[in-house]
Image (cartoon, grey):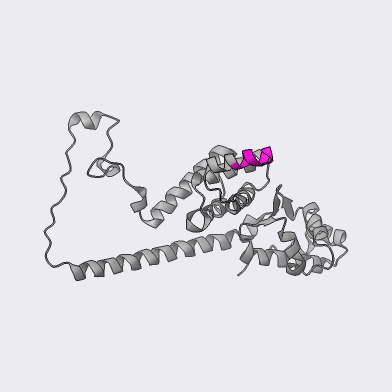
Amino acid sequence: MWIELHDNLPDHPKIVKLAALTKMDRDLARAKLERLWLWALTNRLSGALSYDDVLLLTDVMRIKGDPQKMVDALVVCGLLEDIGDGYYIHDWDEHAGALIDRRERQRQQARERKRKSRDKCEDVTDMSRVTSVTVTPPTVPIPNKDSIDDPTTLSVCAREADGQPVDNSSLPVDNLDEQIRETITEGFTATAGRAPKRTEVDALMANTGADGGMSPDMIRLAVSKAVTYGASSIAGYACKVMGGWRLHELFTPEAVERWEMQRDAGT
């Protein structure tokens, strides 16, 4: 585990201000901030902290007394951002972006190894079962001139032999991930009015799949709520929102809408 640190950190104005507010030596104040960053690498890689996490900081940052006072000082100094229902570590993409990128590459490499291993096992199994097979190639209709000129006609690549749309679930994992990544990027751009950073997309991507459970539509909804709230860290706020949805087992926009209506009605 490692994190990027700037050489001017010990004398950075924010560290100087933190030391003054907490009545600590500058080196001690910097060390406590670094302890928070290192803990987040393993436990809060998105950079988002819940309000409940404040209690953990007593041990994480070796704080004597009320940890909320330290958190308030970090917010005043601009080292933490209050995002409405939690906190976000300021410039987390800058500090941990390289590690997040490396972990994403490692996950992609692991998925590729699993896919190759699975394909190899399937090939061996198929070879052990096959004796003599006659393969008849499928008949693909040759489009006539009218169908070529017709813009509503789909290409052969876009349809199965029976004319039905291709099922994306049969695509390789890497291709499917890339499609999801593009969808998230497009939704973020349309909602936030700017293109997301790669680290922002990586953080949002972590909410998809079997572990995250969130669809691109849910991610776009979370980004929309972050924009509406005016969060300084859109991705961090969106990840926190989706964490709450998972807690309440809300995995569709319709479920979120019903839950919010019930919450607002006090039922």
Residue at 26%, 44% (x, y): give it. 160
**The C terminus, quarter of image:** top right
What is the quadrant of residue 60 in the picture?
bottom right
- Magenta-tinted stretch: 259-266
Where does the image place residue 215, in percent across and percent down from the top left? 49, 48
On the image, the x and y values in percent for residue 189 come to 54, 40
Magenta stretch: dominant secondary structure: helix
The residue that appears at 48% across and 57% down in the rendered structure is 210
Expressed as whole percent of the image width and height from the top left, the position of residue 14 reads 79, 57
Which residue is more in the foreground, 23 or 69?
69
In the image, is residue 191 above or below residue 34? Answer: above
- Whether residue 95 sits left or right of residue 116 in the image: it is right
Q: Nearer the viewer, residue 33 or 118?
A: 118
Query: From what the image shows, is residue 83 above or below residue 16?
Result: above
Direction from residue 220 to residue 14 in the image, left or right:
right
Residue at horizontal 25 percent and vertical 66 percent from the top: 123
**Residue 242 lies within the magenta run:** no
Image point 54% across, 54% down: which residue? 207
Q: Is residue 13 visible?
A: no
